[in-house]
Amino acid sequence: MQLPADYHMHTPLCRHATGEPVDYARRAVEIGLTEIGFSDHSPMPQDDFDNWRMKLSQLDEYVGKVRQAQKDFPQLTIRLALEVDYFPNGEDWIRELAALHPWDYFIGSVHYVSDSWAIDDPQKLSEWKNRDSFEVWKIYFERLTQAAESNLFEIIGHADLPKKFGHRPPQPYAPLYEKFLDAAKKSGCAIELNTAGLRKDCQEIYPSRDILKLAFQKGVPITFGSDAHAPGEVGLNFAEAISLARGAGYQESCRFIRRKCERVTF
Ligand SMILES: [Zn+2]
Ligand SMILES: [Zn+2]
């Protein structure tokens, strides 16, 4: 069986990951992956926007590190990508980033439900107490839907991130994510099975089985990602992710070359 590509991994430039791209690549080869992609947190127009991403001036260094890993591990296919934060009205910046390098794909992620609050930031965990949980989930999926509609991304990242710290979704839940999946189908963007959720309080892959089942029914394609922030996390829990995907009906995932999709069976 061919393991699917691990399309979500970070580098120390984001200031909360360890190990160089060559170390991630070495680990990928060790565990039998044939393709990976680096998708570190993209810079924002202002370098002090937050403290968990590279600066704009480091973008060339990032690309250089990925190119070095490609040179050192010719037996491994290594894609060049970014995990980009989606903000309503932030589309121009994303287009600017897209023009700077020959990217293979962009993962569009919603971490921020306002200009200042990233719901997954452990340092801002107490903010959950000040918010109505239903509102947070609702805004999250509205933004995720806009991200899918924007045509700026090949992949939408960790599609039910608000569960990270164990905050369960409101009921009824399906109306919140159904629109998002319709938008993903319409624009042709994939969703990722992100195994990092298994390492968080929620102890679940992103997204949930229910979301994934509906995604399959609607014909939304998938990718796989460990969201590795250390070399030891590369490809972690892919067996569980594959079994979740198969259980939902999937037999194919996407790979991206210069922002074009190819389907591969897994
Ligand atoms: Zn991160
Ligand atoms: Zn993320």
Image (spheres, grey):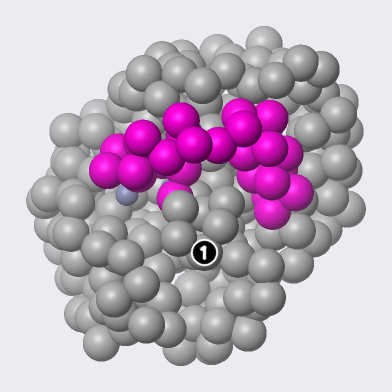
**175 and 130: which is toward the camera:** 130
The image shows residue 243 at horizontal and vertical percentages of 55, 13
Magenta includes 52?
A: no
Indicate whether 37 appears above or below 64: above
Q: Examine the image and state in which quarter residue 233 appears.
A: top left
Q: Is residue 128 magenta?
A: yes
Specify the principal SS of the magenta part: helix
Which segment did they paint magenta?
118-144
**Residue 143 visible (yes or no):** yes
Q: Quadrant of the C terminus?
A: top right
On the picture, is 151 further left or further right than 125? Answer: right
Q: Nearer the viewer, residue 185 or 44?
A: 44
Q: Is residue 165 left or right of residue 87?
A: left
Q: Position of residue 259 (x, y in %)?
A: 61, 68
Q: Height in image: 151 above or below 117?
A: below
Q: Secondary structure at mark 1?
A: loop
